[in-house]
Image (cartoon, coloured by chain):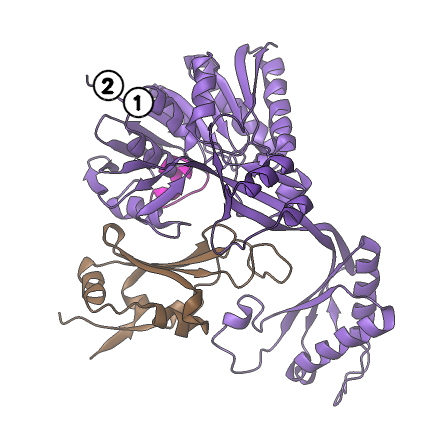
Chain colours: A brown, B purple
Amino acid sequence: MNTVPITDLAAVVRSKNAGPYELTLDIMFRDERDYRFLKEMNFFTGALFAGLYGIPESKIITVVYFDAAFAVKCTIVRPTVSGAPGDTDIYGAQQHAPLLNLRVPLRKA
Amino acid sequence: MKRAAYKVLSPTAILGYGFPERSFRKGVEKKPDLIAVDAGSTDPGPHYLGVGKSFTSRSAVKRDLEMMLEGAIGLSLPCIIGTAGGSGAREHVAWTESIIREIAKERGYSFRMAVIYADVSKRDIVSAMRKGKVYPLPPAPEITPDEVSKSVRVVAQMGAEPVIDALEQGCQVILCGRCYDPIPFAAPAILKGYDPGLALHMGKILECAAIAATPGSGADCIMGTLFDDCFELESLNDQRQFTCISTAAHTLYEKTDPYHLPGPGGSLDLKGTRFEPLEGGRVRVTGSAFVPADPYTVKLEGVKPAGFRTISIAGIRDPILIGRLDSVLETIRQQTKEATGFDGSILFHVYGKNAVMGEMEPEREGQPREVGLVMEVIGDTQRSANDACSYARSTLLHFGYPGRISTAGNLALLYSPSDIPCGKVYVFNIYHLMEVDDPRALFPMKIYEVKP
């Protein structure tokens, strides 16, 4: 199957705290058809996100699709509680970069 | 009976973030029923609740409040401020109250004001714990009464009930301590009998103001209009608009799960929510439902001290040192501890090499051309942190690592003085739900007749 960089299809790729103990990752697609295609093949799984971040699947809290925004969201346990000694991203706003390297299957035009 | 439209003006994402005067005036011309703002967040981290200070500046908060009070007094509207001073503890509320009183004096305003506090005593928490009425919000850990005793400040997020009480007592300005973010926008509508699911979902979007529009901004005004069976959103700046995607995208923002948003006394169920585009860059939202919870729970937020921090910032450009930096830094850490007897934390943040993502960084190949180094020391006292940071910095500056040919100094120190004492460090240690019998009991209110 042909694959393309996710940046060809996504309008938004971002990370942010969901409270001080969780980090949430959002990918939103520009075209509903790309979103539906990847949702139907269940491309985004806990295992996929765990692999991208080098974390055990037990740290994945949820992977959920949100049709209204053509979006998939993954929430993980923060490696360090926000602002605690050793935390390096208080707002969790720069933890999305591994998602930008992702290649995703391309639907047939 | 069909209720009239209920219009809520939200000037900015956080009180003190500012907004264009033109957008605000346009909102006032549309004759809103309420001006409300959220002033807080846990996002800036545990420090602000710990020290009892705001993460916004006094002059910026005063400027925003001047415009809001002028609008509210001019149109005889309620003006509601949630999570005063950023964290909503007693000190934060007092700080914001002093700004409001200063404005009233300078401008000659008179109004009835409610001040609602959200501090929770440690004794009440421990007593509830003993009855099994306090439980962690996973992944926050279980806590013991001993852990609660270490907190310096604990606040609870209030629901609509205390704000409704203030409105029923005729208060025009309502200053809230820690508050569930949508409440300042939703409480008056809930009092008037609008659907709480729609009122709270509208509040959820209004509390971030134009962040939910496109292009987004944390410093611009929007209007939400609530009806019996839907609400509508519009930007008050022609350069922005609401789209179904921008609105839906905001529903995901900072949430664990976009379909289920828990709050005081119940949760928002967005499984049936629909977004519909309207002309003029507006969006209509339907189908959001509030599901009451029994027992009623409120969220507690508390922080405890974790020592004192000192930092020093430097660059490194020497490729020989960068090539062996990890082992050099480990040696410096050990030497500092051995030489000074320091038993706190010594952390090295190497910007250019995994400083942002740490263990989660997937790309570890290649050597950076230069790196930024933040030396961070956390000790029991400011003095011990200063001493250890000074020792680590001077030792690293002149450290003779294997293969060194640059013998004059290893660091491009950024500042003189090179070491910066940062004061107390705090960490979140309470992030729990507490069952309450009465949603008002934790939130005492004072009412004042404010005169110039």
> What element does badge 1 sit on?
strand
Amino acid type of the residue tagged 1 in the rendering: Tyr
Q: Residue furthest left?
A: A109
Query: Can you tell which mark lies on residue B95?
Result: none
Q: Are marks 1 and 2 in contact (CB under 8 Å)?
A: yes
Q: Nearer the viewer, residue B258 or B394?
A: B258
* Residue B201 drawn above or below residue B163: below
Share a chain, discs 1 and 2? Answer: yes
- The answer to which quarter of the image holds residue B354 is bottom right
Question: Which quadrant holds the C terminus of chain B?
Answer: top right
Residue B193 as seen in the image, left or right of residue A19? left
Question: Which quadrant holds the N terminus of chain B?
Answer: top left
Most prominent secondary structure in the magenta stretch? Answer: loop
Q: Nearer the viewer, residue B134 or B423?
A: B134
Residue B436 as seen in the image, left or right of residue B394? left
Q: Which residue is mark 2?
A: B3
* Residue B147 drawn above or below residue A59: above
Q: Which residue is mark 1?
A: B6
Q: Is residue B209 magenta?
A: yes
Q: Which residues are magenta?
A: B205-219
Can residue B417 be seen at all in this image of the molecule? no
Q: Residue at x 22, y 38 (%)?
A: B287
